[in-house]
Image (cartoon, grey):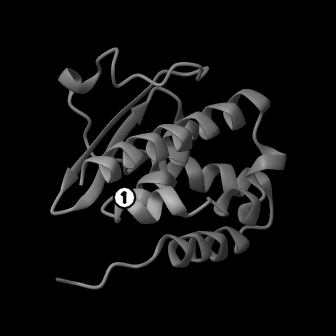
Amino acid sequence: MKHLKSIKIIEQEISQEFEIFDTWMEKYEYLIDLGKQLENFPDEWKTEDNKIHGCQSSVWFKTGLENNLFTCSAVSDSAIVSGLIALLMRIYNNKNPRDIVETEPSFISLIGLSEHLSTTRNNGLNLMIKRIKQDAGLIVKNI
């Protein structure tokens, strides 16, 4: 089995990627491009249980456990939110659920997202992270 990068290392890599852009317009364009690369999210997963409530745009999250690793898949109807989802997938998908619960996200401040996202998008991002941590926490309890 290949060595999995830690959440902190992935957050550092993301931060370094964002440093190459000079303006927030370029960073938003990069986020939108990342969002376009999201894996397919089947329509049958777009259920009320998988919906993140409180997001301005529509967001659906499906999480699970495969080979003792937390898995997540998500989709949004917003281009920028899709980019945020792509970052979250990169950080949290196929990770040890205990690491997810125990590691506080630092990429938001490392990139400067908290200052540059609208209040509603920031709120949505926090709700998505809360959902990931909550679902990972339920898995940890059941292992």
Q: Residue reaching furthest right?
A: 115
Specify whether residue 88 is in view: yes
- 54 w.r.t. 83: above or below: above
Classify residue 86 as left or right of residue 122: left
Classify residue 58 as left or right of residue 139: right
Q: Looking at this view, is 120 or 29 the one in front? A: 120
Q: Residue reaching furthest top?
A: 48
Question: What residue appears at the point 46 percent right and 59 percent down from the top-left corner?
Answer: 100
Q: Quadrant of the C terminus?
A: bottom left
Q: Looking at this view, is 119 or 126 the one in front? A: 126
Task: Residue 30 in the image: state x and y as whole percent.
Answer: 59, 56
Question: What residue appears at the point 78 percent right and 48 percent down from the top-left corner?
Answer: 114
Q: Using the rendered view, name the quadrant where residue 23 is placed.
A: bottom right
Count of all numbered marks drawn on residues in the image: 1
- 75 w.r.t. 139: above or below: above
Task: Residue 88 in the image: state x and y as whole percent.
Answer: 48, 52
Q: Quadrant of the N terminus?
A: bottom left
Specify whether residue 91 is in view: no
Classify residue 113 as left or right of residue 100: right
Other-residue count near label 1 (Cα within 10 Å), few / some / many at <14 / 14–19 / ≥20: many
Question: What residue appears at the point 35 percent right and 42 percent down from the top-left corner?
Answer: 138
SS class of the residue under badge 1?
helix
Task: Residue 139 in the image: state x and y as whole percent.
Answer: 30, 48
In the image, what residue type sits under mark 1? Pro
Question: What residue appears at the point 20 percent right and 30 percent down from the top-left corner?
Answer: 42
Label 1: which residue?
97
- 29 w.r.t. 41: above or below: below
- 113 w.r.t. 67: above or below: above
Classify residue 42 as left or right of residue 94: left
Task: Residue 12 in the image: state x and y as whole percent.
Answer: 61, 76
